[in-house]
Image (tube, rainbow, N blue to C red):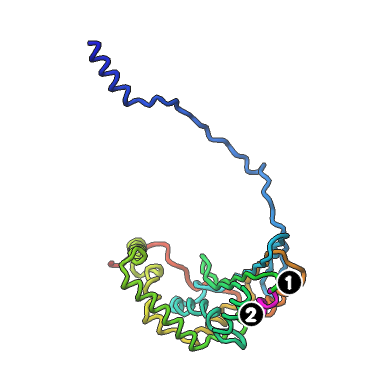
Amino acid sequence: SAAAMAQSGGAAGSLNNERPAVVSKPVPLNWRSINWPSLNYNRTAVDGGAALYTIFGETGKKIRIDLLFETGVYSLPRAMRTNLSATVDMFLQGGAGSRNYEELQKLLADNGIQVTTSISSVGQFQVSVEVLNSDFALAMTALEDMLLRPRFDRDALEIWKMEQSDGFQSLLDGGNSRKQGRFVEQEAIRLAFGSQHYFAHALARTSKPEIDKVTPEKLRQIAGLLISRTGLNAVLSGNITAQQEQSVLQLVRKIPRLTPVTYTWLPERVKTTESN
């Protein structure tokens, strides 16, 4: 009937989208025709396998220095991983030259010198410095002391150990999302790669028994392997002068030249046969 047809049509119409369909086609891009802007930089090779990249900027009052050393996680024995983490932190937190921890931190804070020490995504030791142009010479003096004359004061190391242990215990005691996320992540890695895989032991390496094994002697041993001119890439960027560029080159030349890095191990890519 007409009523039934209307009813049927109405029901069918309620399921139809009345908006017009828009069909888009992919636009081919000719990458070779695109003019990519290039950086205005200089590369200066330094005897011993190092290089300084200078990137000039005409604006801004800050200068940035980045040092990427060749040695890192995978060129040191696995058993030294926790000591390596401590060494990286203690370059900044353990005092340098004639200054103890508190004096070094006061110097950096009073002059707005921002220094970070870390491990890169591929396991290399790196140091970054940001400083106002007017305080560049002071920052270079502090950086030289940190790299070539680190103190690794025992008292400062004990403070580091306490902070690390407290952080680990806080993770165990807390019922927060951060704790859950870390343990879920570790379990996923264990299932994917096996319980003996390097990545599956990330939490264990920050536990108190491992932290307690860290000593100033081991830090000095690792520092003697990390700070090498061989394979060092330095980057100086900002509104810099030729004199400042020479200052960084002089520091790079003072860094000892060691035997080129040999990678002793890398994480396994496949899960080994074992009972989990």
Q: Does the magenta stretch include residue 22?
A: no
Label 2 is placed on what type of residue? Ala
Residue at 47% across, 80% down: 83
**Residue occupying the far top of the picture:** 1
Q: Position of residue 11 (x, y in %)?
A: 28, 22
Label 1 is placed on what type of residue? Gln
Q: Quadrant of residue 1?
A: top left
Q: Quadrant of residue 136?
A: bottom right
In front here: 75 or 41?
Answer: 41
In front here: 64 or 230?
Answer: 64
What residue is disc 1 on? 244
Q: From the viewer's perspective, is 83 left or right of 106?
A: left
The rendered magenta stretch, by its main secondary structure, is classed as helix
Q: In this view, does 106 lie above or below 263?
A: below
Q: Where is residue 165 in the image (x, y as percent from the top left)?
A: 39, 79
Q: In this view, does 242 lie above or below 36?
A: below
Magenta-tinted stretch: 135-142
Q: In which quarter of the image is residue 16?
A: top left
In front here: 168 or 85?
Answer: 168
Look at the numbered disc 2 and give the secondary structure of its residue. Answer: helix
Q: Distance between the residues labelled 2 and 1?
A: 15 Å
What residue is disc 2 on? 142
Residue at 73% across, 71% down: 244
**Residue occupying the far right of the picture:** 242
Q: Does the magenta stretch include residue 141?
A: yes
